[in-house]
Structure formats: C-alpha cells, structure tokens
Image (cartoon, rainbow, N blue to C red):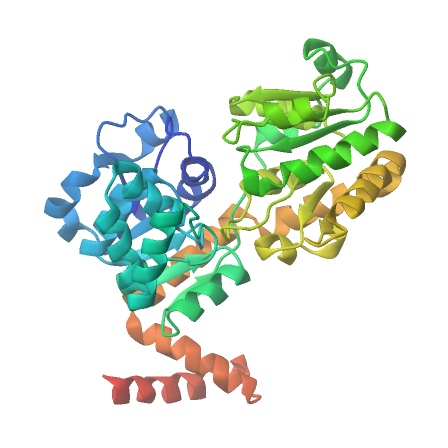
Amino acid sequence: MKVAYFTPINPQKSGIADYSEREVLPYLSKYMDIDIFIDDNIKPNSEFLINNFAIHPYTEYEKKKDQYEIAIYNMGNNGLHEFIFNCLRKYPGITVIHDIYLHGFLWNCTLSRGNTDAYIQEFAYCYGEKGAQIAKRAIETGAYPTFEYPLMKRILDNSLGVVCHSEFGVKKVLAEMSESLVTKLNQPITISEEIKSAANFDIASLKRELFLSARNPIIATFGFIFDHKRYPIILSAFKKFLYYYPNAILLLVGEDLMGIDRLISSLKLEDHVKKTGYVPFGEVLKYLAISDFCINLRYPTAGETSRSVLQLMSLGKPVIVTNIGWFAEIPENCCLKVDVDSYEEDILLEYMKLLAKDRKLANQIGRNAQKYVSIEHNPDTIAKEYYKFIKSILNGNEVIINKIAQELKNFGINESDHEIIKEISERSCDLLN
C-alpha cells in the first residue's frame, strides 16, 4: 500500500510536526510505503525523515496522486495546516483531526489577512444563515466564538474517514455529521531513550546548572502559554501555595503567547516564577526531570490531546489536569483532575499541597501514569490500528462488515461464529451496492 502523508514538519513550531516525526511515521512505515507532502519553502531538518522518506512539496501532489492508494491529512488549529486543508478539499482522504474546534485555523486563514468574506462564507457553509450571522456579529464586536463551533463540516464532507484521539472528538464529529466514518485511536507516544534517560539525570547537578538548587518543590507547566490554559487560576493558587512552601518555584516552559509578565508582576511573583520561552526538546527534558509535579489546565478546550501531558506521564511525573475533553478520559489513578467551577482554585491549591506533602502518593500516581501510557499509547500498537482503519476505508465493504459484525456480537454471536457474521455482512453489502 502506498500512502501520501500530509503534515507540518520541523523546523515548523508545531506539536503535530513532532507527532508525525516521532510517534507516527517511524511505526506506520513498517506497514505501508509512505511519501510525505509538506508546505512549500519548508526544508526538513530531521535526518530520519530525509533518510527514510521521499518528501515533496504539496504542489506536486496533483500530478503524483495516481501513485497513491490514499492520502492521510493531519488537520490542526493554526495556519500551518492551510495547505493540508486546501488539498483535502480537492482530493478526499483520511483526515486526522487533532483539534476539534478549528476557529483559530479559520481566523488565521481569513481575518488575519483582512478577508472577512471568506470568514463569513465558511461559517455559512458549516451552519447556514445562522452561521453567517454569527460570523458577522463576531466581526462587528470582536468577540470571536473560539471554542463554540467546530467548523469542520467542509473537512468532514471531503473525508473518506476520520481519526480522532479521544471519545470527546468522536462524539463531536458525529454530532456534526452522523454518517462520518470515524474511529478513535489513542495518540501514540514514544517513550524514547531520551525520555528514559531523563529518569537517570543527576538532579542535583541539573538544579545547579539551572540555578534552582535552593528551590523546593519545583512545579512546572509545559507548552505554549495561552489564556485558556488557566494561568490566572494557576498563579493565584501558586501565590497561596507559597505560604506553605516559601522556597517553591513555578517553571513556565514554553513560548508566551498571552503576555503573562503583567500578571506575574501584579501578583508580585517575579522571584518565584521562571519563564523559559521556547526551548528545544533536550532542554525540555531537563525541566521535566527536575520537576516534582506538573500542572496542565485548560478551559475551554479545542478538543486536543496533549502530547506534553503524555510525555509527563510517560516519565512518571504526577500531573494536575482540568476535568474536560480528552483529559477527563485519563484514568482516575493516573492524574489529579480539577473541575472548572467556583472551587477550581481552592481544589488546585489542595492538590498542590497534597503532592508536595505526600511524596509516596505522588510517586504512585506517576507510576500508574507511566504504566498506562506504555500500554494504551504504545505507538507500534496504534500504528497497526491505523493500518487496519486505512484498509477498512479502502475496502468499503469491510467498513460495513465491521459495523454489522459488532451489532451481531451485541446479540450474543461471538468470534467463533465468524462464517455466519461474514455471510450476513456480505449479503448486506450486496444489498447496499
């Protein structure tokens, strides 16, 4: 099977680039022949990609498309995915929807360029005249519905199949288009030798290197710093936490996209909060290694699965998350979950105190998380599931057979009755053809 795989790649600053390069392509390529299609004027810097794949600008796909049995499109919520969106509209394939709410993508491709008509037209395509009015009102008021409308109808209309990484995502897709052929595959995460080695770092030496020797406990957040990641709540709870642990420090590891310095200053936390800015993966591992526990809150959610949280869990770090979307699907014994309500800050503070005080509990949560990730997010296992889903889309009858087989099993017909299941399913296919 030969497949065209569309994705951002490094050096583009994209979690999906890392996802493709580290978690999918090394494993999926064991089961199929893959060519990679990327945006124009981007030069890959991954030796693994350069040495193992044919890499083409997306503009060459039109003349090459007959060489491939199907295309796989990775769709995310920023302008880096515009070339992917344009291709999947013309040449339907399997779309991996990483973010369920795509307003950020639409805004980047329309309003950021002054193209109000295209913004309104996309809302109208997705939600009719009501959608057009929503878009016009947003433009007039500047209050954009960032997390209210998935805006994925055009994608679903032009997808032969859809992959989501959460039940939350699957439900949203089916709510938008009930007839979509959608499957949930856990996001793969490689527990690389780099990550494994972080468990053996000399923590004392690292703390000296990072000028953090006197700090305890060390709390960290990872990833882009956005408003919806609840930083006002985190910093307010952390300020109260300092009453109990005055030598604590909060590390903000990632690029600041909200201008958080003013908030830090207003709370007089300059001596207790360190903002690193964007750091390469090797540096991220250092901050991961020295952290006692981590916080990753967000509300609203775009429906994303957090690779950074999975990395934290894979390293055995206890993490506090918001009880929403994919995060709510993490097993209860693998993290601590905070609801978004009037008690959010209070509960966050109590969880922080608990993890700082009870190291035995914190370590057990970390071990549970590590075991869960190693089993349920195993990239080789998930690559096999990718392959099966791709095959099922290429063989439309198999999609129908699988669905009917599942229904028959619900009636008590088990796998030992395979011939009965197959015969009934194939007769159903004949009727539908």
Residue 272 in the image: above or below residue 409: above
Tally the marks: 0
Q: Quadrant of residue 16?
A: top left
Outermost left residue: 63
Residue 109 as seen in the image, left or right of residue 321: left
From the viewer's side, name the closer residue of 273 and 158.
Answer: 273
Outermost front residue: 140
Residue 299 as seen in the image, left or right of residue 113: right
From the viewer's side, name the closer residue of 319 and 255.
Answer: 255
Residue 346 in the image: above or below residue 57: below
Q: Residue at x 80, y 18 (%)?
A: 215
Q: Residue at x 31, y 58 (%)?
A: 123
Q: Residue at x 32, y 50 (%)?
A: 73
Rendering coords of residue 335 (x, y %): 73, 48
Whether residue 262 is visible to the viewer of this picture, yes or no, is yes
Quarter of the rendering occupied by the N terminus: bottom left
Residue 106 in the image: above or below residue 164: above
Whether residue 1 is visible to the viewer of this picture, yes or no, is no
Q: Quadrant of residue 197?
A: top right
Rendering coords of residue 27 (x, y %): 44, 44
Rendering coords of residue 211 (x, y %): 71, 10
Rendering coords of residue 393 (x, y %): 32, 65
Residue 341 as seen in the image, left or right of residue 377: right
Quarter of the rendering occupied by the C terminus: bottom left
